[in-house]
Image (cartoon, grey):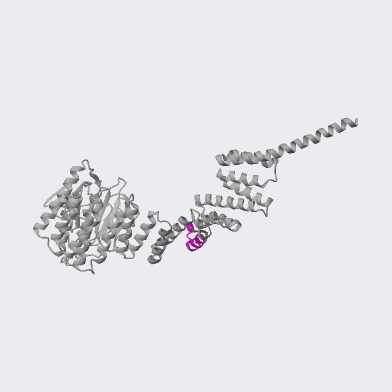
Amino acid sequence: MKTAIFRRSLTIALSLLILFALDARRLDEYSREANALIESQNWPALERLMLQGIKEYPDREWMYATLNQSLRNQKRFDEALKQAREMQKKWPESERSARTLGWALTSAAGEAYRNEQYQQCLDLATEARELSDSDSAYVWMGNGLRKLERFEEAVRIQEEGLKKYPANPWLKPNLAATYAAWGKQLEESGKLNRAAELYEKAFALDPDQEYLLFRLASAKRSMGQFEEAIELFRAGTKRFPDSDMFERALGYTHLLQLRSKLETASVSEIEALADRALELARSKNDYESAEYYIKVIGEACIKTGNAAKLRSSLLSLEKSLSDPVPLWDYYGHQLYVLHRRKGPVPPEAKKEALLYRRKAMSTYESKHGGRPTVRNLELPLRNPFVVWAEFDGDYMTHTGFAKYCYDFSRVDASGSPLRPGGKRMKASDYLMFGEPVYSITEGTVTMIKSDAPDNTGGDYGYEGNTVVVRTPAGHYAFYTHFKQNSIVVKEGQEVRVGTTLGQAGNSGMSSEPHLHVCMYDQNWVSLPFRFRSVSVKEGNRTFETSEPLKENWIVYPRGP
């Protein structure tokens, strides 16, 4: 009996020894298999393995940490955070549990950032930094603060993080992004010097980001530091040859530089800017690339009144440009304006200007067959008016790319545009001055200008007060010469047919109050258009028509 009991006890003891030996080997196997799964990034299998291991070895901390790693890599951030907090409760003094919770916090912070939950991102990253002061905590704290526009705090955190962790690949570009965002805010509030300083810091940190150099150059331009801006934009064209925004901005900066000097610079200084622009224009292959340099030449010559230089400069570009059509249109326009600024346009100059503008439009239309005619439009005025200029008339602003434009002015029952006692000496002598102007289409207001003064006594300006409406079809209704500060619509506003836009005036290229109205395509070349059938008077004859209106016809609107 005793022998049997002894044998049974021995068997149990041996079994336990074998089990313990097997368990020890299984723990090593867990470690080896876990490492293999981590290397292959098989996170679901790693999760299953660690859950099994924790059941058998509930006090093995590394298994909890490895389980958390698998959850984070499966983007189950909430679960990972909850599990890490439980792990820290189990091992409150452990560096490994603190480190695991820190990783879970920063992973959750990153997910909150990606979901645009920036305050949550900041809260989680702040907790992580207090817990383990990791580089990831600095990354997400800085990003959260930047998105919350707490720029000064963001810079302090990111600069501190960069000093502690200079090898982190994200802290430097993120700090650059914060400098840039802060600079943009300051630039928009008019603090250009400080904005430029921040852009310089940003670009020094992350010189591979083209937008940083572009913003720095733009800030210099806004400060009136045109030569510095030109050098920076030129550097951008070389550093980022695949980006076209630097090239366009470079040309525009040359134009703004000229405009800033027109009232103060000498004739020789203005002509020097035009000469430089001509050399740059000659290096371009198409009109679009050369456009701003061509405008520098055109505006400089108008200021100096040098028609010969305008002609020789612009027409010298005909052969170098692959598409001289817009050059012809622009030359004709500028030639006319140059002479009109001096007084009546000489017949030969007018003939040449109209010739080039008509040549441009006829060539364009021959290359773009099938252009639509916009029909059934409502009239822009509610009282009788006279047609002062028709399509392709002998006015510079009604030929070329502006071929399909009208000029209208209100008249009384006798056909006179003047108020009783009016003597054509000032804008208010005309019935048209202050006349309401209505939208001829529905659409979205894309541009307004309202601060140009009204001309008096036959004076002549340049840019008139203007409204542009983009129609649902993608065309543009263009209205100009509004009375100063009379426009009542805003950019971005949706308008209907008949919406009041403002009051007719005498601003811009207008010697007598009238409305200039056109329809343009997406290339800003005018489109033929027709109004609904209206009653018109030609001499003693009155009739209905929906055909193009002619000069000197009096039109009788039917009302709203």
User: For this view, does 175 lie left or right of residue 257?
Assistant: right
* In front of the other: 52 or 221: 52
- Give the quarter of the image for residue 292: bottom left
x 23%, y 65%: residue: 454
Residue 380's x, y, as percent? Answer: 25, 53
Q: Is residue 206 left or right of residue 34?
A: left
On the image, the x and y values in percent for residue 182 come to 44, 61
Residue 342 on the magenta segment: no
In terms of image quadrants, where is residue 482? bottom left
Residue span colored magenta: 146-159
Q: How many numbered marks have been drawn onto this rendered protein structure?
A: 0
| Magenta part, dominant SS | helix
The image quarter in which residue 22 lies: top right
| In this picture, residue 241 sits left or right of residue 83 | left
Which of these two is toward me, 556 or 450? Answer: 450
Q: Is residue 509 above or below residue 374?
A: below
User: Image point 80% across, 36% down: which residue?
Assistant: 13
Image x and y of residue 6, in percent: 86, 33
Q: Which residue extends farthest right?
A: 1
Query: Left or right of 331: which side holds 229?
Result: right
Residue 410: x and y, percent?
20, 58
Residue 453 visible somewhere in the drawing: yes
Q: Nearer the viewer, residue 525 or 276?
A: 276
Give the position of the N terminus as an image quadrant.
Answer: top right
Asked whether residue 387 is in view, the answer is: no
